[in-house]
Structures are given as C-alpha cells and as structure tokens.
Image (cartoon, rainbow, N blue to C red):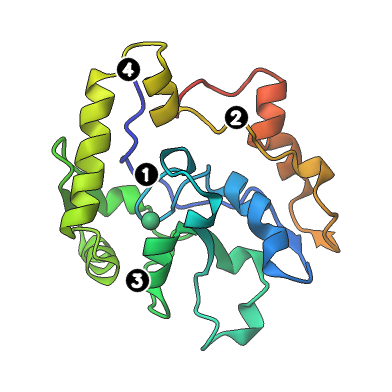
Amino acid sequence: MLPAPFAYPTKPHCRRHGPQCYPSHRHYRNWLRDEFSFRCIYCLRREEWLTLSADFEIDHFLPKSGHPDAEKDYDNLVYACNRCNRTKAAKYLPDPQSVAYGLSLAVDANGEIRALNQEGENLIDALGLDDADYTLMRRRILETLSEAQTGGKTLRWLLGYPDSLPDLSIEPKPKSNQRPRGVSDSHFERRERRLLPDYY
Ligand SMILES: [Zn+2]
C-alpha cells in the first residue's frame, strides 16, 4: 500500500528540532525542511514536485506584525510553499501543533478537498485550498500516481524524499538547541542508518 500524498497528519505536529538564536531566518531553512518533511504544511505540495527551492518559504505562523517577539522563535516557524505563504499572509490559522490537520481536512480521489470540522473550514477559507488550481494540482498528482509503476522513476519523484537531504550536524551551530536529539532522528541520519522508507 503506497502512502497517500494528500493525507494530512492525523496527529498534531510535535517538533523534532529546536535551534534558537540564529541571526537570520535563512539559517532555519534546512531545519524546517527536515521538520516538515520537505513539503508545504498547508497544501502538502512537495519540494520534489517543484523545480526551484525558491518556491518554498519560511512562514511565521503567528504573524510578525502582531508578534515581533516570535520572529526568530523556531517553534513559530513553519515550512510552506510560496502560494500558501502569500495567501496566509498575516491571518491566524488553526495551529498544527495543537490541531491535527488530518482530522480537519480530507482529499478525495479526484483532488477535491473537504472540511471535516470547523478548523478544516477555517483552513480552506483562509488559504483557498478549494480553489480550482489547487484541486487541479492534486488531481494531476493523484492521476499520475495511479499510473506510476512500482519501483519506477515516476513513483520515486512523486513519493520519494529529495536526494540531497540536509545533514543537520554540519549546519552552522545554533546558539542553543532545545531538542538536540532531533539531529540523530533527521531524515539524513535515518537514511544513513537505512531506516528511511523509500516512499512517504
Ligand atoms: Zn502550500
């Protein structure tokens, strides 16, 4: 049974990493890529489906405008595609660290998204996740997946991890790390130990 690429997590997100006090946002990028499994937390688009790393951005979950103190707080940063990040802007959304998006949102086989509760409705409304282009993107990915061959390149592209997983042990050292053990649990380290599945 292959993983479903548009199945949102069924548990609230529990942070694996905790770097703090970097001088700028770009230092958090690889930590966040690993933290959120190389995909947009809001629409689940994956890095591998896009061609440029610039298509993904760091989102301040609590907007900078109302929460300047949280601007460089790792726990307030999430990884998002540029479309979702732009649409979200300074809006307040259900927090993925307390709300399981998978209990709030469901995607049908034809790419349509449905809200399962009020939080799901809020997410769809705020981000426009039911806009025609999001639905078409999901439908195309799901159609391509249904025709992909076992072990083939297409399947690896759709469901595999990036080849260049970040080695967090050689990132510039943060001033502090609230969850240092996360490094040994990173995707890179798990692949080194042959514990990373082929597909997710
Ligand atoms: Zn997105």
For badge 1, the amino acid type reads Thr
Point out the tag, 2 or 3, that comes first from the N-terminus: 3
For badge 2, the amino acid type reads Asp
Residues at marks 4 and 2, CA–CA distance in whole angstroms:
23 Å
Visible residue check, residue 116: no
Quadrant location of the N terminus? top left
Q: Identify the residue at image location x=69%, y=40%.
A: 166
Circle 2 sits on which residue? 163
Q: Nearer the viewer, mark 3 or mark 1?
A: 3
For badge 4, the amino acid type reads Met
Circle 1 sits on which residue? 10
Q: Nearer the viewer, mark 1 or mark 4?
A: 4
Q: Which mark is residue 169?
A: none
Point out the tag, 3 or 4, that comes first from the N-terminus: 4
The image shows residue 146, relative to residue 53, as above or below, that is: above
The image shows residue 104, relative to residue 141, as above or below, that is: below
Circle 4 sits on which residue? 1
Residues at marks 3 and 4, CA–CA distance in whole angstroms:
34 Å
Element class at badge 4: loop
Element class at badge 1: loop
* Residue 43 pos. (x, y %): 34, 53
In the image, 136: left or right of 96? left
Mark 2 and 1 residues: CB-CB less than 8 Å, in contact? no
Mark 4 and 2 residues: CB-CB less than 8 Å, in contact? no
Circle 3 sits on which residue? 87
Task: Assess disc 3: are there few (<14), some (14-19) or many (≥20) residues with their C-alpha within 10 Å of its C-alpha.
Answer: few
For badge 3, the amino acid type reads Thr
Q: Identify the residue at image location x=80%, y=49%.
A: 171
Quadrant location of the C terminus? top left
Q: Nearer the viewer, mark 4 or mark 2?
A: 2
